[in-house]
Amino acid sequence: MSTSKPDGSFQEAVLLHPFFKGMERSTALSLFTECKRLEVGKLSTILKSFEHRLGLYLVVKGEAEVVVTKEKEEILEIISKDGIVGLSSLYSVLKTDVEESVYSSVEVKAKEDCLLCLVPYTSLQNYWNEPYLKNFLLEETSKRLQDVYFSLSQQVGVAHGLEERTTILKRVSDVMTNAVVTVRSDDSLEDAARAMGEKRVSSVIILENNRIAGILTERDLVSRCLARSVPLTKPVNMAMTPNPTVITRDAYLYEALAAMIDHSIKHLPVAGDKERDGPIVGIITLHDVMKANHIGTLTSARKLENKDFPLEKVKPTVESMLTSLWQAQAPVLHILDFMSGLFDRIYQRILRQVEEELLQEGRESPCSYAFYVMGSAGRKEQFMLTDQDHFLVYEKYSKEALEYFCDFADRVVMALEKAGLRLCDGGMMANQKTWTGSMGSWQERLREWSVHSSEETLLKVQNFLSYRFSFGDIALHSTFEDVIKEQLRSAKILLVRLAQVEKAKPVPVLHSSIRSILGMDRKTVSIKKDILFPFHHALQILNAAHGNTSGSTKEKLDFLKEKRSISSEFAEDLSEAFQEIMKLYIELKRKAQGDTVHLSSLTTRKKENLYKSVKTIREFQQMMLSHYSLT
């Protein structure tokens, strides 16, 4: 930081600062002669904490940050051009003598190259009776005080439920074990076992060229080696789990928990960057997560998979988990991903359970099958246990298969209802004749849908195109997807009809100054019917037009981006708009307020965010329609 006497150009720039601008010219020039010019480089310190303050610093050029440093640096305020640094110590001006103990507990840094003008407190005392100066400083101080109180009130609101935030929103790096026990892939199993014993750990990470190649746990040693009499002289890569699930150090704890639940694992290697093959920096276990996280409901996540956990308790447990995530202000996409993973596990538990029940009755599955979820579950957007949307495909028709899977689907539907998923009003469930069948019958059904596109058929297709594989035979699923794609290639008219339906249901225009003046502006909007449905339908139709038939909302946006159907920038805009809408939708559903929002009830900020998001989604709908020349 350099200090120098003011020059002519600096003088004119300073006299244009609001501090001087309203003074008499002669008074301003007189006070200016007592000021000093300061030049501060980017990221340099202007004022240190607990340092004696000499006066007010007028920001002539650049921006300064007021920061406080505890465990980490937090920015309290940004002061831009025409702003003032040092108002918090202005009390010294009101005293007869300026004490040497004038200081502040905060630090001020230059966000960018700054040009400042120091007005000493001693000089201010001499001009304190200048009317403009006194009124200006009183107004600026009052305004700053108002901002401080507003900021404090916001922090109090954010601090509500602090216990949840300080646990679930901790980073993986806060909890992980840094000292990772590693071995090379060509080391022996005996070497790995010895390392576990000496270091008292339950797993070792296998490295190849300093990259994570696999993981070996105590359970692997027992089940894959000792139980099968595999010699411990064999290389460790014979028993390791190759290409294990990896998480980054900056991920949140609930992301680690979600990964463990989703993959049924207890150990996660931690990479130092966003790449899966990045250098290993630590390891985190299920025990670490549960030990760090004192939210009881989240520790129940794994219990949902246990067949002994009562189905009647699933819904309240799930609702409690959602509440924890919401109160912790977890990002929307993470909430949807976490909750979707839980619901997948519930579905899979019930499907396995029904299989076992029938097997105990002496009824073995006559052929392979694939079970699919649709609607919000298919799009990975189900954050609450709502209604059931699913269908079933089995390998080949036979009387035995028909009887078995009819009974199978009935039991699954009953169990899901017991767990809190109510029956679908439209009957779109696997226990209905139109939503189950052999591969051959599904192929014929898809052909019928494409030929006879009635209003009822189009409704079915809209729901069907949100499907996602949930459980069953992977090979059968792959064959089924090939059948769907082949059918869509010869069903262009069906996609056009779907697009025509969307043209008749345009995304509303919410912001129109002319309509507002005339009192014609919209008072309410249905988040689901007016915004989310048109968005999802447009996304489905464009994906189907390019040969993609399944996936979550994010996956479908990524697909269109890869196909260059939409730009990366617009894909990002759509993702942000979707998250903003879903945030509002989740808030409404949690308060049991349906899906209709009264615009007058929204804060100005929420309303503006909604307007912007709806405009983006409307543009996307128009883009889809233009693909079929329907605009």
Image (spheres, rainbow, N blue to C red):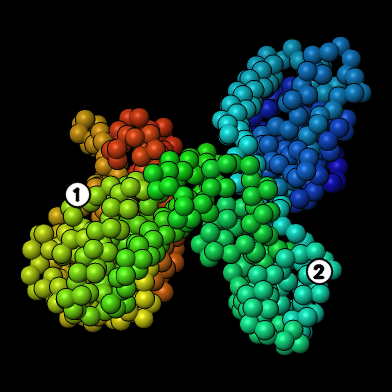
- What residue sits right under mark 2 in the picture? 197
Q: Residue at the location (81% across, 73% down)?
A: 195
Image side of residue 532 versus residue 68, left or right: left
Q: Is residue 310 left or right of residue 421?
A: right
Q: Decide if residue 247 is on the left or right side of residue 548.
A: right
SS of the residue at dot 1? loop
> Considering depth in this image, is 255 or 425 the residue closer to the camera?
425
Question: Where is 53 relative to 299, above or below?
Answer: above
For the residue labelled by badge 2, is the local secondary structure a helix, a strand or a loop?
Answer: helix
Q: Is residue 384 visible?
A: no
Q: Nearer the viewer, mark 1 or mark 2?
A: 2
Where in the figure is residue 519, as x and y percent of width and height?
A: 21, 30
Where in the figure is residue 553, as x and y percent of width and height?
A: 38, 61
Q: Amino acid at mark 2?
A: Gly
The spot of residue 264 in percent (x, y) is 54, 64
Cα gap from disc 1 to disc 2, whole angstroms? 57 Å
